[in-house]
Image (tube, rainbow, N blue to C red):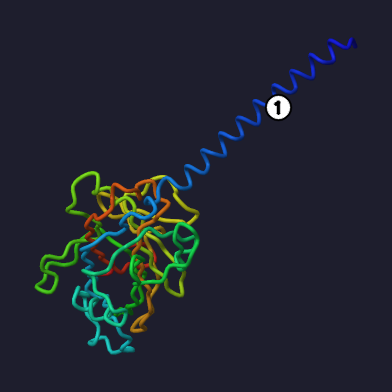
Amino acid sequence: MSLKTYFDKNRKRLRKRKRLIAFLSILAVLGLTTATYAWFTVNTFAGVQDFELNISTGEDLRVSMENHGSDIKQYVHVITNEMIDSYLRKHNTSLKDLILAPVTTRNGSSFTYERGSAAEANDMDSYFEMKCWFIATTDMYVHLTTEGPQDTEEYAGVDGTKVSTPSPAPQSDIVKAIRLGFQTDDGVKTWEPNKGNPATSLTTFDLPSGTMDYNNSNQLFHLDKLTPKQATLRLWMEGEDPECDNDVQEAKLRVQLSFIGCDENGEPIS
């Protein structure tokens, strides 16, 4: 091999190496951009205010914010905003004062801010959390449902599960950045309204826009007859969701949850 040929080959290797380094550098920059794009800009107001949270249940299924044992008469079909406010008083806040800030989670139970510091539930600029107890008149699997409960006086004006906002576009994109988690001794299930591509490693499910299909994805937990089960409900704004950007700041959020009991085949229990 001549000296000229040797240097020519070395120059080609060097050019290829430079192109590879440049390509990897671009990928690194894109990776950093993707990781930080969704979060609100630092030092800007980060919150969602004035959200409503109503919880309704099916006829054979009841709920309470206290454990009353097997005395089913002490449980109710609807948890009102007033009940939730009473619960939040021990955190020195209320629904109208609670502000949701972007947080993220890998397990649905512990949360952090963008820079990795721990987020505390029901704190200023954080996420919402409350505990309640479900009980049923028979064994059942509890599902989240978009279908409204029976048309009785107690259920007047109550619809099925949904997340909505009165805020105009682009603030209305907040409904795509919200997550609702349900944790029991059966595990953690997370509902992602308007589910898109996965934003984190946390497994989520969405509900159908049409007729409900009750299956393992929207099954939350199992109840034994007249045996209360504690459930921790968490509502947060997922900072790594692509829609969780400056456009949704100060948006108004409304959340409605509705539950139904089904048998092992996914058939609603009447």
Return the residue found at the far right. 1
Residue that carries the numbered disc 1 in the rendered image: 17
- Residue at far front of view: 43
Of 230 and 22, which appears nearest the observer?
22
Residue 209 or residue 111, whichever sits in front = 111
Q: Is residue 201 left or right of residue 154?
A: right
In the rendered view, tell whether residue 97 sits above or below residue 68: above
Q: Position of residue 97 (x, y in %)?
A: 24, 69
- Residue depicted at 32% across the width and 62% down the height: 100
Identify which residue, 209 or 182, lies in the foreground.
182
Residue 246 higher or lower than 67, as above or below: above
Secondary structure of the residue carrying numbered label 1: helix
Location of residue 157 by image quarter: bottom left
Given residues 216 and 250, the one toward you in this image is: 250
The image shows residue 267 at horizontal and vertical percentages of 31, 63
Q: Residues within 10 Å of mark 1 (few under 14, many from 20)?
A: few
x%, y% of residue 263?
Answer: 35, 68
The answer to which quarter of the image holds residue 16 is top right
Rendered view: 250 above or below 16: below
The residue under the point 18% across, 62% down is 159
Which percent across, then down, holds residue 13? 75, 22
Q: How many numbered discs, if any?
A: 1
